[in-house]
């Protein structure tokens, strides 16, 4: 569609309050290029009665200037379900759009780039889970929401990083399979007496941070308060002052206002939170998620104009996957922060250990 993207006086006026919010992250010299895109997206969104839901790891121009709702993947899926809009644009990665579609099957869910994947979600398939269940018959499978619908469909129940311990303990069993993040599983194992069987999946952003790096930042920055995500290694978490989900970290910083903080997670989140708490100083170790960065203002606009790319899930996968998510919701736990206990030894399975064909 041929749309003129010009920085007219009307566009400048309409977007001026947004520039105020993001001027630390979008240099004013670039604003005449960015503002027409923001303006066009917001106009088209209104015309189509669509909403944009943006993950905490999206860049500030998306997060603060075009998103209607922001949050972690599950919060966004709930927002998608609750909104009256029939068109949802997911500014996030593919498994998030699938989770939104699972909870809103009657709505049109669009993802602006088909390349917005996730190393963690891609570490495990439905076939892997079926083999794991053969190896551990009768052991419940608890699956992190950062997985494909195919994997959720093979699972007994889903969890998030903040409610994983409560969900596992709600099952009343001695042993569970917890998929797919190895570090999250080890960190959860430190918080519960339930034995955890893990999978060798990793988030390529969080696995890059090291305990040594954190010690270096502390030495260089007196008074630094370190908040870490539980997808980081147990060794790193031992160095942190607080461990919790992205929402937990945001809540902590907004409520307690430590004067100088470092969020050990994807670096756009620091930018997004910093824009809202100007009195807090942020130290930013910048590990970007290349998958999240596939989403841009340009492809959001195209997504809305061309109604692409629509997320679809075959009902034979969607029904059991939705059941696993709904079971988690029905447990009614709000989640908790991590206490930083020592992780016991955890069995970590991988494709070669469950699939003789992959091993040979
Ligand atoms: S930050 Fe990690 S878990 Fe999140 S989308 Fe990127 S690779 Fe996946």
Image: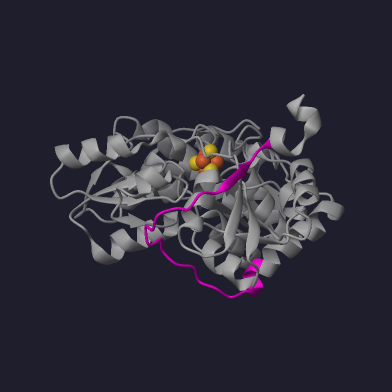
What kind of secondary structure does the magenta stretch mostly adopt? loop
Q: Is residue 343 found inside the magenta-colored segment of the image?
A: yes
At a point 24% along the width and 46% down the height, the residue shown is 282
Residues drawn in magenta: 328-350
Residue visible at 43% across and 59% down in the picture:
247
* Residue 3 appears anywhere in the view: yes
**Quadrant that contains the N terminus:** top right
Which of the image's four quarters has the C terminus?
Answer: top right
Residue 308, quarter of the rendered image: top right
**What is the x, y in percent for residue 148?**
69, 46
Looking at the rendered structure, the number of numbered marks drawn on it comes to: 0
**Relative depth, front residue between 16 and 86:** 86
Task: Residue 20: give x, y in percent of width and height.
Answer: 29, 48
Left or right, 356 with respect to 159, comes to right
Residue 143 is left or right of residue 289, and the answer is right
Can you give x and y, in whole percent of width and height, for residue 5 in the image? 50, 33
Viewer-proximal residue among 255 and 215: 215
Q: Residue at x 84, y 49 (%)?
A: 314
Name the residue at the right extreme. 316
The residue nearer to you, when weighing 108 against 355, is 355
Placement of 102 over or under 263, stated as above or below: below
Counting from the top left corner in percent of width and height, residue 115 is at 63, 32
Can residue 68 be seen from the camera position used here?
A: no
5 falls in the magenta region: no
Relative side of 261 to 136, left or right: left
- In the displayed orientation, state which residue is furthest to the top: 360
The answer to whether 123 is drawn above or below residue 339 in the figure is above
Instruction: From the viewer's side, name the closer residue of 292 and 85.
Output: 292
């Amino acid at each position: 569609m041929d749309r003129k993207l010009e920085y007219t006086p009307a566009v400048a006026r309409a977007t001026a309050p947004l520039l105020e919010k993001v001027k630390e992250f979008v240099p004013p010299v670039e604003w005449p290029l960015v503002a027409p895109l923001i303006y066009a997206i917001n106009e088209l969104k209104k015309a189509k009665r669509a909403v944009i839901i943006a993950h905490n790891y999206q860049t500030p121009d998306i997060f603060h200037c075009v998103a209607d709702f922001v949050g972690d993947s599950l919060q966004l899926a709930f927002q998608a379900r609750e909104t009256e809009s029939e068109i949802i644009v997911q500014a996030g990665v593919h498994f998030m759009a699938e989770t939104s579609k699972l909870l809103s099957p009657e709505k049109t869910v669009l993802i602006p780039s088909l390349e917005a994947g996730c190393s963690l979600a891609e570490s495990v398939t439905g076939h892997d889970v079926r083999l794991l269940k053969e190896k551990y018959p009768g052991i419940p499978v608890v699956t992190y929401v950062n997985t494909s619908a195919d994997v959720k469909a093979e699972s007994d129940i889903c969890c998030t990083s903040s409610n994983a311990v409560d969900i596992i303990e709600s099952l009343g069993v001695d042993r569970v399979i917890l998929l797919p993040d190895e570090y999250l599983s080890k960190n959860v194992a430190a918080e519960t007496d339930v034995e955890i069987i893990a999978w060798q999946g990793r988030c390529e952003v969080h696995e890059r941070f090291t305990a040594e790096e954190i010690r270096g930042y502390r030495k260089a920055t007196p008074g630094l308060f370190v908040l870490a995500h539980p997808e980081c290694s147990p060794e790193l978490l031992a160095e942190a002052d607080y461990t919790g989900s992205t929402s937990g970290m945001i809540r902590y910083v907004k409520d307690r206002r430590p004067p100088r903080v470092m969020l050990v997670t994807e670096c756009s989140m620091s930018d997004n939170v910093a824009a809202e708490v100007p009195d807090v100083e942020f130290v930013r170790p910048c590990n970007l998620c290349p998958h999240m960065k596939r989403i841009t203002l340009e492809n959001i606009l195209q997504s809305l104009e061309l109604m692409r790319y629509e997320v679809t899930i075959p009902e034979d996968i969607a029904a059991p996957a939705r059941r696993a998510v709904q079971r988690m919701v029905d447990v009614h736990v709000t989640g908790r922060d991590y206490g930083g206990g020592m992780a016991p030894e955890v069995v970590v399975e991988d494709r070669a250990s469950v699939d003789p064909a992959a091993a040979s």
